Image (spheres, rainbow, N blue to C red):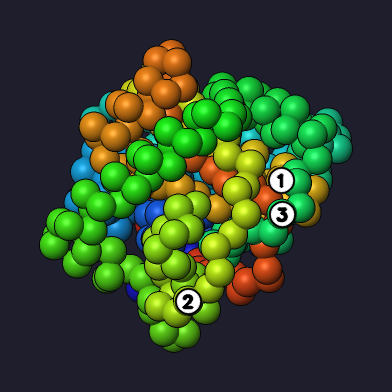
């Protein structure tokens, strides 16, 4: 039996369906889309989809929590755009680690122009894996993006020239360690280079290709060749703690940064390798001064137009609500 979207709080069933579609437009590692949702009169639940984990690249589910946090931020922002406040509880049931959040759309919300612009950016945001041009990101944009991260309880340090050199080395070493692992290669190949008929994973058209001397786009999602890109603006989404709640919040901060960038016409993509290999992640933390846990590295700039990655249908990400939301 196909599950139906139920009205929730002040939202009609049609509005719930709309905000859930916005949630599904969040980014995720290899476009695994590791989220599930349910709705009931008391709230909308955000669940992790345990069947879409990456046991080799993400054994502690850190990147899964980042991805689901990004979906949660889209959900919150889309609800707010309807004029309703999304009261959010994290990990509302300790016995169920896959139930990540309960969002209660219960009260009217005042107009927020910044959130409205972010809501408009949700369908426009997409990951750009191509090399970036030499056009610099405007200096004033970095302050805006840093503020976006801080609102969501995270920090966004920019890497200086010396740190970029160190990061370059860490990317190459983590890339080497991962690609030498047959289990990693097998897992990566399952999710990348997919045909146009699939609604998950990274298709050839969205990935492009990469040359071995272009560190910033070292992963080859497309299988062709291209010229190296200019050095982009590189920032790190970081948190002072590294518990599941911090990772979920980091995902929301990441998405707020990405939407703020999109609203300004700035492209972005992820540099995942150095945060996926624990020993390299520890060295990246040291490179940042030792105070922040690096959650994801972002490169920001201006690239060639690329198609968006596909998304699963809404009916494929719905589950039966728990007693918390009915």
N-terminal label among 2 and 3: 3
Front residue of 310/57: it is 57
* Residue at 80% across, 48% down: 264
Residue 187's place in the image compared with 119, above or below, is below
Residue 188's place in the image compared with 63, above or below, is below
N-terminal label among 3 and 1: 3
Q: Which residue is mark 2?
A: 225
Give how far apart the Cα atoms at labels 3 and 1 are.
17 Å
Which label number is shown at residue 261?
1
* Residue at 41% across, 84% down: 195
The spot of residue 270 in percent (x, y) is 50, 49
Residue most toward the left?
A: 182
Q: Mark 2 Cα within 10 Å, few/some/many (few <14, many 20+)?
A: few
* Residue at 70% across, 26% down: 147
N-terminal label among 1 and 2: 2
* Residue at 47% across, 72% down: 209
Front residue of 311/214: it is 214
Res. 104 visible in picture: no
Q: Which residue is mark 3?
A: 134
């Amino acid at each position: 039996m196909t599950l139906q979207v139920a009205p929730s709080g002040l939202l009609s069933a049609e509005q719930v369906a709309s905000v859930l579609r916005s949630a599904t437009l969040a980014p995720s590692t290899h476009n695994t889309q590791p989220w599930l949702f349910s709705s009931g009169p008391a709230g909308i639940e955000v669940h992790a989809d345990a069947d879409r984990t990456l046991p080799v690249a993400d054994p502690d589910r850190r990147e899964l929590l980042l991805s689901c946090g990004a979906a949660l931020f889209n959900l919150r922002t889309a609800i707010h755009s309807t004029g309703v406040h999304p009261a959010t509880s994290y990990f509302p049931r300790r016995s169920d680690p896959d139930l990540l959040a309960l969002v209660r759309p219960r009260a009217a919300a005042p107009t927020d122009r910044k959130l409205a612009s972010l809501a408009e950016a949700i369908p426009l945001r997409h990951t750009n894996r191509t090399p970036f041009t030499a056009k610099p990101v405007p200096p004033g944009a970095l302050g805006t993006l840093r503020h976006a991260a801080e609102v969501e309880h995270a920090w966004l340090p920019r890497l200086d020239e010396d740190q970029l050199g160190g990061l370059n080395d860490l990317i190459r070493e983590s890339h080497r360690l991962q690609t030498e692992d047959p289990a990693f290669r097998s897992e990566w190949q399952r999710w990348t280079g997919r045909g146009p008929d699939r609604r998950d994973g990274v298709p050839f058209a969205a990935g492009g290709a990469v040359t071995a001397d272009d560190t910033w786009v070292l992963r080859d999602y497309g299988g062709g060749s291209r010229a190296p890109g200019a050095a982009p603006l590189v920032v790190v989404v970081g948190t002072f703690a590294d518990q599941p709640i911090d990772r979920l919040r980091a995902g929301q901060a990441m998405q707020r940064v990405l939407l703020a960038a999109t609203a300004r016409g700035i492209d972005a993509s992820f540099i995942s390798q150095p945060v996926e290999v624990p020993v390299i992640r520890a060295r990246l933390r040291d490179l940042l001064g030792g105070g922040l846990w690096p959650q994801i590295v972002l490169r920001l700039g201006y690239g060639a137009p690329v198609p968006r990655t596909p998304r699963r249908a809404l009916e494929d990400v719905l589950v039966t609500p728990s007693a918390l939301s009915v």
